[in-house]
């Protein structure tokens, strides 16, 4: 890895000032698990690296008055996974976070770092999309904007951060009453690998199984994490049946644009997107499907 | 380019060291501080051979810039034994249960399992497998690694 100047920021203001000063020559580092690999491979060659571990404003996890959840950008995955706040938000949230890489990496990698890395095969984005999450972006001078997580990803390893802008925190709105979350990571190997495809669903149904809330997040199925809007539209307001879920899940094939890689052909991933969308929604709706939902 | 003087506690002793920001903990331990018990396998955080503890947390030494441990407490495989050289219960269990073959992954396996037992002294088999998933053994000696951890936890044969 080529060397660089390291500057440890001690406040958000200082980090933004350094970012403004060094522009394209600079990279921010939090846990470093993604950036260091990119640097070792020469894919990113910053002249200046700005350390965020001393920036208190980027840390912390808290519930909002309305029952939502806010996490600072440099919160590690393990901190969020094991936090009482995440468990109280929804018991499935720590489970979804618990399949990211390994405990060792979750101790180092941060939730904000994972998002700005914009790798379409990561686990948190589909979960945060299903939960209607947003991210808070901030510039020098305190000017900030909020984006839905689904709009934060622009292309393969490319996010919506403008020059001089950084991700300050993420917000997840309260879970709608009666809604449940389920994240399914499909992969033929152990969970520390990247998903072949992954599906996150937030679903709320009435006593007669009428769908009152549905959001679908998809991972490893395109150049960015995706939202399955067609599936949502086909099911929202409908009385769910296994046949209806199966038909709706088939619509996901036209919404995804997976890449051929070592984890499967694009054709295979497209088909697995359908299968796992169906199984995840059916499991949340209380229906049995042909295949087991692990 | 910048050079940094860092101070940290390494296996119970205060250490002051000067490093460039690109230096990774696994390399600094091995090449500059003479602690070769920490191994380097994949260098990308996957294999677990470089597992160390920083402030008690299990991390990959190959993805940890040395400057990140400034002011912190680092424990490596060399720091587990007592001052008299007495091995930990877990290290003894790896010997009695045959928890290693070629040995390259063993330091990492023991550091990972030490962190597991510190957080969860009586893990069930699924918890052991889930926790240890990030430590690969090219000899595929996984059953005996699990046996060793269960032996150290005093739950061998209790987990079915």
Image: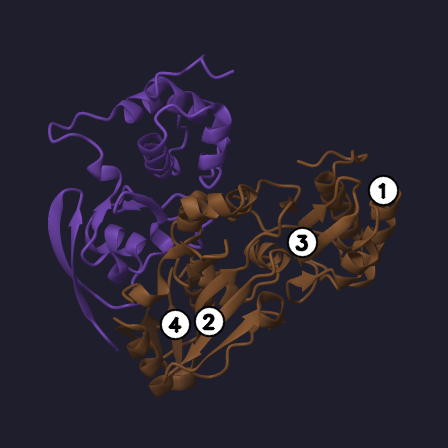
Which colour is chain A painted? brown
How far apart are labels 3 and 4 at the CA level?
30 Å
**Snapshot quadrant of residue A241:** top right
Q: Nearer the viewer, mark 1 or mark 4?
A: 1
Identify the mark at residue A42; answer none if there is no mark.
2
Residue at position x 42%, y 76% in the image: A45
Residue A76, position as x, y percentages in the image: 40, 54
Q: Which is nearer the N-term, disc 1 or disc 3? A: 1
Question: Compared to A99, does A68 lie above or below?
Answer: below
**Is residue B54 or residue A142 the one in the foreground?**
A142
Q: Which is nearer the N-term, disc 1 or disc 4? A: 4
**Snapshot quadrant of residue B49:** top left
Q: Which chain is purple?
A: B
How far apart are labels 1 and 3 at the CA level?
35 Å
Residue at position x 47%, y 39% in the image: B136
Residue that label 1 marks: A241
Q: Nearer the viewer, mark 1 or mark 3?
A: 1
Is residue A85 shown to the viewer in this render?
yes
Q: Which is nearer the N-term, disc 1 or disc 2? A: 2
Residue A20, position as x, y percentages in the image: 37, 85
Q: Which is nearer the N-term, disc 2 or disc 3? A: 2
């Amino acid at each position: 890895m080529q060397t660089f100047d390291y500057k440890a920021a001690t406040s958000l203001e200082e980090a933004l000032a350094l970012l403004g000063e060094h522009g394209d020559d600079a990279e921010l580092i939090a846990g470093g698990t993604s950036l260091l690999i990119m640097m070792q491979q020469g894919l990113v060659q910053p002249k200046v690296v700005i350390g965020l571990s001393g920036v208190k404003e980027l840390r912390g996890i808290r519930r909002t008055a309305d029952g939502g959840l806010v996490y600072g950008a440099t919160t590690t995955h393990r901190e969020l996974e094991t936090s009482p706040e995440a468990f109280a938000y929804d018991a499935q949230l720590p489970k979804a976070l618990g399949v990211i890489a390994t405990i060792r990496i979750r101790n180092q990698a941060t939730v904000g770092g994972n998002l700005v890395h914009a790798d379409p095969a990561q686990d948190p984005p589909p979960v945060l999309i299903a939960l209607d999450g947003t991210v808070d972006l901030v510039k020098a001078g305190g000017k900030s904007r909020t984006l839905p997580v689904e709009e934060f990803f622009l292309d393969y390893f490319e996010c919506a951060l403008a020059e001089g802008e950084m991700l300050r925190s993420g917000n997840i709105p309260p879970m709608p009453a009666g809604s449940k979350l389920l994240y399914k990571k499909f992969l033929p190997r152990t969970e520390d690998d990247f998903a072949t495809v992954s599906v996150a669903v937030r679903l709320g149904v009435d006593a007669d199984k009428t769908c009152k809330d549905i959001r679908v997040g998809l991972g490893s199925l395109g150049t960015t994490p995706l939202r399955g809007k067609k599936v949502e539209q086909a099911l929202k307001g409908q009385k769910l049946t296994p046949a209806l879920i199966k038909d709706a899940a088939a619509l996901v094939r036209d919404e995804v644009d997976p890449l051929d890689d070592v984890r499967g052909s694009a054709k295979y991933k497209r088909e697995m997107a359908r299968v796992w969308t169906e199984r995840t929604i059916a499991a949340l709706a209380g229906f049995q499907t042909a295949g087991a939902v692990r | 380019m910048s050079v940094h003087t860092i101070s940290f506690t390494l296996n119970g002793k205060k250490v002051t060291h000067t490093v460039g920001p690109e230096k990774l903990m696994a390399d600094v331990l091995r090449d500059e501080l003479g602690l070769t018990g920490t191994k380097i396998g994949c260098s990308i955080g996957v294999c677990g051979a470089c597992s160390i503890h920083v402030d008690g947390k299990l991390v990959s030494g190959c993805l940890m810039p040395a400057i990140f441990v400034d002011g912190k407490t680092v424990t490596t495989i060399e720091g587990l034994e007592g001052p008299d050289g007495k091995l930990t219960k877990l290290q003894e269990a790896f010997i009695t249960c045959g928890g290693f073959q070629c040995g390259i992954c063993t330091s990492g396996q023991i550091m990972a399992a030490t962190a597991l037992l510190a957080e969860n002294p009586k893990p069930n088999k699924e918890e052991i497998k889930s926790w240890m998933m990030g430590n690969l053994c090219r000899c595929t000696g996984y059953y005996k690694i699990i046996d060793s951890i269960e032996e150290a936890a005093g739950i061998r044969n209790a987990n079915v």
